Each structure stands twice: as C-alpha cells, then as structure tokens.
Image (tube, coloured by chain):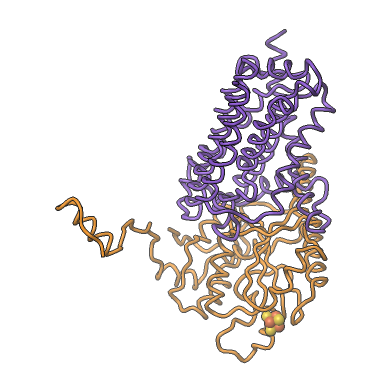
Amino acid sequence: MDALRLMLELFLMPLVAFVIGLAMVLLMRRIGARLQRRVGPPLLQPLWDIIKLHGKETQTSHGLIHEIGIVMAIGGFVAAVTLIPVPGMNGLAEQGGLIALIYMMMIPSLGLALGVGQCANPNGSIGISRALTAMLAYDIPMVIVVFGIAFFFGSTNLVQIVEAQQAGGIATWGLVEMPLLAIAGLFAMQAMLGKQPFEIYIAPAEIATGPMVEMGGKFLGGLFIMQCFQLYTAGALYTLLFLGGGENWLTFLIKVFGVVAIPMTIAFLFPRYRTEDVVRLVWKWPAMIGLLGIAFLMY
Amino acid sequence: MTEVTKTPAAGDALPVKTGKRTNPLANVFDELVRFAQSRSLFMLHYCTGCGAIELPPAMTSRFDMERLGIQPMVSPRQADILLVTGYVSVKTLKRVILTYEQMNSPKYVIGICSCTVNGGMYWQSYATAKKLNDYMPVDIYIAGCMPRPEAVIAGLRGLIEDIRRGTADTWKDYYRRYDHYLGNQQRLFGEDWQTPTDVIAEARHYGLFGPGTLGERTALLERHQKPLEALEMKLDIPELMARRSGLGSKGRTEVK
Ligand code: SF4
C-alpha cells in the first residue's frame, strides 16, 4: 500500500508542480505587462506556447546529446520536485533531504550545457558559459543559506524543518528566526532564476537568448517546461525554508506565488549587469549577509 | 547532399495525404494544435526598412501584441513569423532567405509596407527586390507606407484566423515549388547561389515533394553546389601566435 501511495505521489508531484509552474509563468508575464502598462497574455498562454512548440512540423535536432541535454534539464527538476514536500504529499523528501535537493537543482544547468554544446553555435556557447558562471556565483550564498538552515534546525530533512517551523506559528518561521539568511536567500533566488539584473545568460539583444539560440520546436518547448519547474522549485524551496511550508494547499499556494512574485517584480525594473559584476555582487552582498546571519545564529 | 532523382510528374501521388484525417480523435488533436499555433506566435522581425518603426508601438503598451499571444523572438529557430518590414535590397534579401530557410515550419511570412508588395517608392531602384513573394511564399501583406500599428495588428489577426482555419500553409509552397523560387533567387544572385539549408532533402523528408520541387534550376544548383564543411578551428592572431611560439622556446617573452 505504501509503495502504491509513493508511486502515486511520484506521479502527482511533478504534475502539480508543472501546473503551478504554468501559472507562475503566466504570473511573471502578467506582472511584466502590468509594469509596462500592457494587458498581458491570456490565461492559457503558457500552455498554448508549449503545445505549439511541440506541434511544430520541423524539429531541428543537432544530434543525440542535444536531445538528451533537454531531457536532463527537465529530468533534473522532475527529480527535484519529488524531494520537495507539499501539503499531503512527502514523496521522497524524508529520504532525500536538503543536500540532495540542492544537488538535483544543479543537474538542469549541466544538462543544458551538454545540449547546447552540441549545437555548436557561438552564441549558445557564450550563453552556457555565462549560465555556469552564474551558477558558480549563486551557489556560494545558496550553500551558506542551506548550511545556516541545517545548523539552526539541526537537520537537513525538509519534513522536519517544516514541522519545526509550523510548531509555533509565524514566530517560529525561518524568516523571523533568521531574517539575514532570508534576505540572502532571496538574493540568491533572484540569481538562480536568472532574472534581471542577473539575467546574464538569457540576453536576447546581446547573445540571442544564449543557450536557447539553436533551440526550436520541441527543444524550446522542453525549455519552457523546464522554466515552469524552475519557478516552482525556487518558490517552493524558499517557502519551505523560510515561510514554514504550507499547512494546507491554500496557504502553500499563497506563499509560493507570493515568493515568486517578488523577484519578478524586481526583475522588470532593472537592466542587466555584466557577468563579472554579477559574480562580484553575488559573492559580496548575499554571501556576506548570509555569513553574518550564520554568525548571529552561532553566538 | 541532394541527389536529383526523377522529377515527379504533375499527376503523381504525393507521399502525404492532406485534408481531414479519418480518425475523429486525430481531428480533435489537429484542431487543438492548430488552435495553439494560432494563439501563440513568436515573431522574428527582420527590420529591413523604415516600416520597422511601427512595430515597437504595436508591441508596447498602447497596442500590446502579447494579448494576442504574439511575442518577439530573436533567433530563426524559435520563430514562427518572419516579419519583413520594408524594402529589401538585394544584399538583404540573401539574409532574409537564409533566415527563412532556417525557421522551423509551420512558418509564416508577413510583408509589411508597400515596398514588399511591389517595390513601392523604390520601384526604379536597381538594388531592391520588388516583390517579396517571388523569392519566398508570403502569407499576408500589410500595405501602406508605412502601415499604422492598427493595420499591423489587423493583419496579424487575419493571419491568426487563417492559421486557426488551417489555410495558412504557404510554407508548403516553398517546398512544392522550390524550383520556381530558386529560379527567381538565381536571377538576382547569380546561378551559383546556394544556401546551407538543403531544401530538397527537407521536402523529401517531410513528404512535401511536389511536381515543382525539382526542375532545371535545381539541376543548376546541383551543378554548382559545394558541400558544406565545418569551419576549421584555428587561431589567427599574430601576436598571440608569436607569444605562443616564444613560450615554447624561452618560457616567457615580452609583449609590447
Ligand atoms: S513602404 Fe514606405 S515606409 Fe515602408 S519601407 Fe517602403 S518607403 Fe519605407
């Protein structure tokens, strides 16, 4: 019975994540539209985009690794969302833990790097080198934040972390207990989502959207799906670490969407930094704030 | 490389049947895909002429194309619509054709401005191509010098309607009558004109081989075609090479 339930959860969790991710893409585009005084795309626009891209008649593939890269990019996130406990479903969260989750979240970038590498397009190569540089940049504050969390709760088990936070209402939320780490985490999340001002690898006017330059049809569709998962993963992870997860689906969704809306709102107000500036900025401020936060926790 | 086999005659059966499929579920699926295609259009605006100036207003807050599901994309691989906005000089036309051939079908071409329709005020110019649809199939023309954003949006709505009905399939024409289009291209660019995209092989692969795919112009192409080769990887920076060879012998050289 348990095995059956686990199978069901492993199937349902990515599905739920995908649907929420679609809504988040819509949210992102609507926020952008509102900030620019536009109407924005209709309700099902993200879904139409994905269906259309998979329905293209010509699918220009550049070889086997190109296709496997995309599968890896999506697969990494699918694996990641099964490690994120949501209300009513724990999936593999008990067995996986925070470290495995962070590890899984790096796989998509590597998969993308593999896939783009085979396209042999210079813009793509520049884009992916920037993406990996950005990953190097945001992983430092991220690891600091994760370390702080694990130190504070004495566990890397996400289920336990959530339970500990839910024990005393808002007063025991990570956000209240570790405000500095929460700020650093938000900063790192902005870079992780690749949003302005850290949008170095998806630079449309500069390197023709970088890694996506040779992607058409189902490959781009795959990346759109990956983006849905990426938004969900980032939002849900932050909610679990700092906002006490969700007692039920309603509060969970409110928190997750609220979290994702913050970087989106910031994003559309900023232009883009250069690569070296991103690294300098991210290694300086969020890393320093994070270290300060850990220092407060320890003493 | 293409091999020229026998030219299919006019009456020959096409490898892929067109029209409604017999399975009702397949029809529903087709309908869904067509609807999604009509509601999500990525456009590549190849801003060749002055008409491009009317696109920013059509995209930004006042007219907002995104509410129709239309958004700009930057590389031909991702795009559905190729917007040619204004006069195309002969040199530009080469790039437009390269771009068009790299796009993934179904692909649509929109000619904005009178200049793409008949040459417009550049009618007497020796350096501009007059009719865009001589060189590639065009789905919709939006005439005017230059058309206002309302007209652009109206034209795009027309295209959306065509796609939803499934009648916007001029891109197939490029494969079916490649000989005709190639002939016009050769007339402008000379008979050794070739593109990196193997259109004939694509036509064969997608079952869009028509009676006009092969002909005397494609035979000409075949004669002149040079095989595409990967570029040789080499660094040709004299200073760097000097430093490199210096490194080998002395370990370190001074660079002025
Ligand atoms: S039709 Fe007029 S506005 Fe358009 S490209 Fe020609 S001259 Fe320019």
Q: Nearer the viewer, residue A113 or A176?
A: A176
Q: Position of residue A66 (x, y in %)?
A: 51, 43
Residue at left offset 67%, top offset 68%: B83
Q: Nearer the viewer, residue B102 or A1?
A: A1
**Looking at this rendering, what residue extends furthest in the bottom direction?**
B124
Colour representing chain B? orange
Q: Is residue A47 left or right of residue B202?
A: right
Please say whether residue A76 is visible from this viewpoint.
no
Residue at left offset 49%, top offset 73%: B216
Residue at left offset 15%, top offset 52%: B250
Indicate whether B190 appears above or below A163. below
**Looking at this rendering, what residue extends furthest in the left direction?**
B249
Colour representing chain A? purple
Q: Position of residue A84 (x, y in %)?
A: 68, 24
Please say whether residue A161 is visible from this viewpoint.
yes
Indicate whether B184 appears above or below A161. below
Q: Is residue A24 left or right of residue A296?
A: right
Q: Is residue B198 left or right of residue A149?
A: left
Rendering quadrant holding ligand 1: bottom right
**Looking at this rendering, what residue extends furthest in the top direction?**
A1
Quadrant of the frame with the N terminus of chain A:
top right
Residue at left offset 77%, top offset 45%: A26
Q: Nearer the viewer, residue B54 or B223?
A: B54
Indicate whether A147 appears above or below B211. above
Q: Position of residue B234 (x, y in %)?
A: 31, 58
